[in-house]
Amino acid sequence: MSAVLIQDVELRYGRHQIYQNFHFELKRGQIGAIYGPSRTGKSSVLLLASGHLLPAKGKVLVDGAKPDHKRTGLGPIHDLSPLFDTLSVEEHLLFQAQLHHVRQAKARVQELLQEYDLEIVRRSRVKDVAHLEQFRVGLATAVVHRPDLVLIDEPERGLTNDEWELAYQDLRNLAESGSTVMLTTVLRQVAERCDVVAVLPEGEVWEP
Ligand SMILES: Nc1ncnc2c1ncn2[C@@H]1O[C@H](COP(=O)(O)OP(=O)(O)OP(=O)(O)O)[C@@H](O)[C@H]1O
């Protein structure tokens, strides 16, 4: 069974058709990329996979069922799942854990601070930490409730090449631990590190 199946999907905003016959499939533990220029509908694919958007035609299944917010982790995508950047890193993660009704929220936050090397900045405001740390706060936010599917919009944004290498390793570790990861990117060098790539606007699938 596919971890993510987006089959023959047509997406429109009102009369504006973004794509039709879009097809994308990912297995558990893979990293998938939606790659293409600006305004081709990359973020919208993530919103289809999270269940925030419904297709005009076609179907979207996550682990064989309708997308379920509770089993999906959102990195910052448009205005969804924002970083509350005036909170400290620790306060932000605790707030997110409570929003998701995570049991033993404090212990989970402690675990994430360690896993993503954020202990040193736990008391800093999210907006004051370095770009790589902000990426990691976003990722820790997405995984706080241990979702099966993690969705991240343009993870490389604002990072240097060396920082992106570390961020990529975080994503690969997450996938190797059994999550499925979908990201969007405008950069070919990011797309080609992923396992399956859909290239917009045409939607052709590429396995680098
Ligand atoms: N809620 C909405 N209502 C109407 N049109 C929308 C809405 N969201 C997105 N669009 C339009 O759909 C198209 C695709 O948007 P989307 O954000 O998915 O593309 P994108 O490739 O992720 O763009 P970017 O790289 O600029 O973030 C754009 O033309 C955008 O203006």
Image: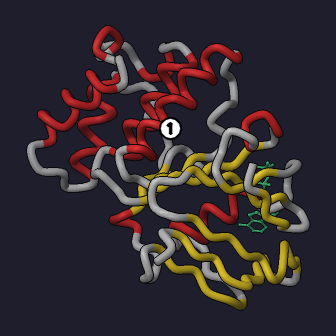
Q: Quadrant of ligand 1?
A: bottom right
Q: Which quadrant holds residue 42?
A: bottom right
Decide: is 41 above or below 111: below
Q: Is residue 58 left or right of residue 109?
A: right
| Residue at image coords 75%, 41% | 192
Give the number of marks.
Answer: 1
Q: Quadrant of residue 119?
A: top left
Q: Secondary structure at mark 1?
A: helix
Q: Give 178 or 187, whichever is nearer the viewer.
A: 178
Q: Is residue 145 above or below residue 109?
A: below
13 sits to left or right of 166: right
Residue 67 pos. (x, y %) = 46, 75
| Place of residue 173 in the rendered image (x, y in percent of width and height, measured from the top left) | 43, 36
The type of residue carrying mark 1 is Leu
Label 1 crowd bin: few (<14), some (14–19), many (20+), radius 10 Å: many
Coordinates of residue 107 in the picture (x, y in percent): 12, 34
Q: Nearer the viewer, residue 63 or 9?
A: 63
Return the residue found at the far front: 208
Identify the residue at the far bottom of this view: 57
Rendering quarter of residue 5: bottom right
Residue position for label 1: 171
Seen as rendered, the residue at the extreme top is 120
Vertical order, 137 against 95 (above or below): above
The residue depicted at 47 percent of the width and 20 percent of the height is 133
Residue occupying the point 82% across, 39% down: 188
Judge by depth and name the residue closer to the eye, 28 or 36. Answer: 28
Q: Residue at x 45, y 46 (%)?
A: 175
Q: Is residue 21 left or right of residue 158?
A: right
